[in-house]
Image (cartoon, coloured by chain):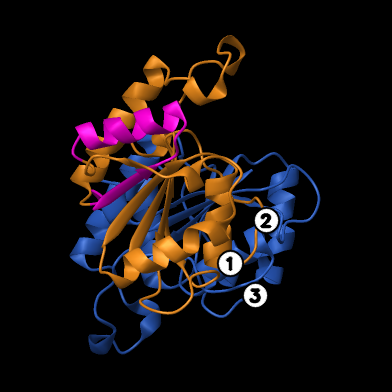
Chain colours: A blue, B orange
Amino acid sequence: MRLLLIRHAKAEDAAVWSSDAVRPLAPEGRRQAQHLGARLVELGLACDQLLASPLLRARETAELLHATGAGPEPEEWDVLAPGHDLSELVPTLARQRDTGVARVGLVGHLPSLAAWAEALAWGEVRGHLVLKPAGVIGLELPDSGSLAGQCTLFWLTSPKLLP
Amino acid sequence: MRLLLIRHAKAEDAAVWSSDAVRPLAPEGRRQAQHLGARLVELGLACDQLLASPLLRARETAELLHATGAGPEPEEWDVLAPGHDLSELVPTLARQRDTGVARVGLVGHLPSLAAWAEALAWGEVRGHLVLKPAGVIGLELPDSGSLAGQCTLFWLTSPKLLP
């Protein structure tokens, strides 16, 4: 199974929105998400399942990925909100893997996404992966067994490096 | 300073060449290297310096990157041949960084390139980075101080994911 960890696209300025949970994408962010969705389709990386953080900027990003054909209607997953540990994701990811899901897209936030990727690939978190808004980390899960420290990294890109 | 670790493009079949050192690129590999060079130019990632392993498939890859404008005339660097340790590269890389070189491209082989990248970003080698022929790993070096375990990964792509 392949996992695409997708950071929400560029959002409106935090300073002008009273609630972080309903801060929407900026116009540039909407373009980034649409572009990413089109690229994923073109690259043969459309997802079988799209899971998004409940925060608006992540849900909007996932909706735009869906609208461009990069995955089915997104589902909200509370564990993708800020502040959750990889251990809260792993049982679900392992179950998806074991039921034959080929490609899952998780739309969420920093620092969690980059930290989870490091923990999945190296078993520890160093903060040495750069993930820009609308950037993607691609991980390949092992066919069986535990996930932490056992995944391989096959892709890391920012929107600028995916023209 | 940014470092682009570039694996040589697809080479001719090892079974039909008596010496591994003079095994040339396959026609598909030449196309991959030209495409990568054009993409690096377009993305603003042309290199200030191109260093290549002395093995023919790496030198040919570097020459094609140069021909497409992705860097100056390549220089051979024995340390990029198979079998060298990161410790043999680090003094030269640190010197380039300290003299203000912005972007260096190193064209070489597996498993060294992926192992060096892991050692530069995480301080240890796990073999969990996937680097395809004509694939690229992009690392950002810290502005000063030691390199091992102190670099950040900003890019990892295969030719398929860089259309």
- Disc 2 sits on a residue from what chain? B
Residue contact between numbered discs 2 and 1, judged by CB atoms under 8 Å: yes
**Within 10 angstroms of label 1, few (less than 14), some, or many (20 or more) residues?**
many
Q: What's drawn in magenta, residue-wise?
A: B45-69
Mark sitting on residue B122: 1
- The residues bearing labels 3 and 1 have C-alpha atoms spaced at a distance of 20 Å
Q: Quadrant of the N terminus of chain B?
A: bottom left
Residue contact between numbered discs 3 and 2, judged by CB atoms under 8 Å: no
Q: Quadrant of the C terminus of chain B?
A: top left
Based on the picture, tell me whether residue A94 belongs to the magenta stretch: no
Residue shown at the point (66%, 52%) measured from the top left: A151
- The residues bearing labels 2 and 1 have C-alpha atoms spaced at a distance of 9 Å
- Disc 1 sits on a residue from what chain? B
Dot 3 corresponds to which residue? A85
Residue shown at the point (54%, 69%) measured from the top left: B148
**Within 10 angstroms of label 3, few (less than 14), some, or many (20 or more) residues?**
few
State the SS at label 3.
Answer: loop
